[in-house]
Image (cartoon, helix red, strand yellow):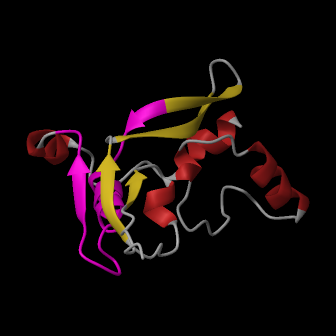
Amino acid sequence: MRGLTKKTKIILSTKLAESSPIINGVEIIVDSGFTKDSYYDSKKGIKVVKTMKISQASARLRAGRAGRTSPGICYRLYSENTFNRLETHKIPEIARVNLEIALLKIVDCGLDPFKFPYFEPPGEQVIRDT
């Protein structure tokens, strides 16, 4: 009779590792230190996807996926010095994307987009440019 073999679960870290539900048995996280995020390029008038360095907060979230339900470890493919130079938090989405549709909905509801109670305001210039 064969013995049971243990399978090791490894996540090659992406944004999924920052926000996913608990995956039982994840023992190893490999964090590249990069992410792909959408940005609105106002000069070109289009949304672009950029590969960017992650923030310290994102790195901590990624590392936290290892060892949730059993012992685990995170291997970062960058130095501690690099980690210390990362931004503490990433740029909020409201500051990176085209707000045209959201602003049109606010105006359509009869509200003033300059006085709207945003959780995190985009800034007057962003509203004007949109």
Q: Nearer the viewer, residue 50 or 6?
A: 6
Please tell me in which quadrant of the rendered image residue 27 appears.
bottom left
54 vs 43, left or right, is left
Q: Residue at x 47, y 75 (%)?
A: 22
39 over 57 or under it: above or below: above
How many circles with numbers are drawn on the protein?
0
Q: Residue at x 61, y 65 (%)?
A: 118
* Percent of width and height locating residue 37: 53, 40
Can residue 111 be seen in the rendering of this structure?
yes
Q: Residue at x 70, y 26 (%)?
A: 46
Position of the N terminus, as image quadrant, is: bottom left
* Percent of width and height locating residue 34: 38, 39
42 vs 90, left or right, is right
Does the magenta segment cover residue 71?
A: yes
Q: Residue at x 46, y 31 (%)?
A: 51
64 over 13 or under it: above or below: below
Residue that sits furthest to the front in the current view: 1
Does the magenta segment cover residue 2?
A: no
101 vs 9, left or right, is right
Q: Nearer the viewer, residue 42 or 62?
A: 62
38 over 23 or under it: above or below: above
The residue range painted magenta reads 51-78
* Percent of width and height locating residue 49: 58, 31
28 vs 98, left or right, is left
Can residue 123 be seen in the rendering of this structure?
no
Position of the C terminus, as image quadrant, is: top right
Q: Nearer the viewer, residue 85 or 61?
A: 61
Residue that sits furthest to the bottom in the current view: 69
Q: Nearer the viewer, residue 130 or 35?
A: 35
